[in-house]
Image (cartoon, rainbow, N blue to C red):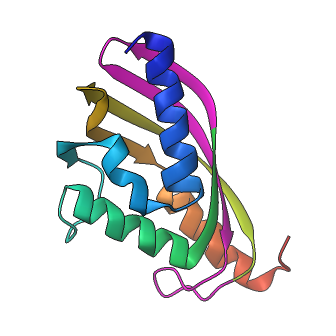
Amino acid sequence: MTIQEQKDFITHYINTIWNLGDTSRLEQFLHPDYVDHSLPPGLPPDSTGLKQWIALAHASFQPQTIINEQVAEPGTCMIRITMHMKHAGTWREIPPTGLTVSIPGYRCFRLQDNRIIEHRALIDGNTLEKKLTAGRTTKPE
C-alpha cells in the first residue's frame, strides 16, 4: 500500500467499523494475527474483543469519530481524532443523558499484508465520564 492508500484504508475503517458499528466487515480490515493493546481488561485483545467493545460502545452511544490529522509511514498510520458521543444508553452505571460529549484521542495502527495487525489508542475516557456525570443536572443538547 502507498502512504495515501494506508490513510484511505484507515479512514474507511473508522467510518465503517466505528462510526457505523458494522462489525460484520471486520475481517476485511483486520489481519488474522490482529492484536489490540487498547481494549479494557477482561476483553480478549483480538478481533473478538474488539467486536465486543464496539457492541458495548454502540449500546451506550451514537458515536461519530472525526479524523483531525493523519500521519503515516510505510506500515504505520497514526490519527488524531475527536469523538462526538451522543449518550443514548447506560454507560458504566450512568443512565442515558441525551448529551453529545466531544473528547479527543489518538489511534495508532500497524499494518501488515494490507490489513491492521496491531492497534493502540489513547482516548480521554475520564473526561467523557465527567461530562456525562455533570450532564445529569443539565438539559441534553
Q: Decide whether residue 89 is among the magenta residues.
A: yes
Near-viewer residue (138 or 46): 46
Q: Residue at x 31, y 50 (%)?
A: 27
Residue 33, how many percent across, how many down?
13, 43
Residue 40, quarter of the rendered image: bottom left
In this rendering, position of residue 60 left or right of residue 108: right
Q: Quadrant of the C terminus?
A: bottom right
Q: Residue at x 54, y 50 (%)?
A: 16
| Residue 40 visible in the snapshot | no
Q: Decide whether residue 75 is among the magenta residues.
A: yes
Residue 64, relative to residue 31: is it above or below? below
Q: What is the residue that sits farthest to the left in this orientation?
A: 33
Q: Residue at x 20, y 55 (%)?
A: 46
| Residue 72 visible in the snapshot | yes
Residue 88, quarter of the rendered image: bottom right
Bounds of the magenta segment? 67-96
Per the picture, the main secondary structure of the magenta-coloured stretch is: strand
In this rendering, position of residue 42 left or right of residue 120: left
Residue 21, how many percent across, how many down?
52, 62
Q: Residue at x 58, y 63 (%)?
A: 128
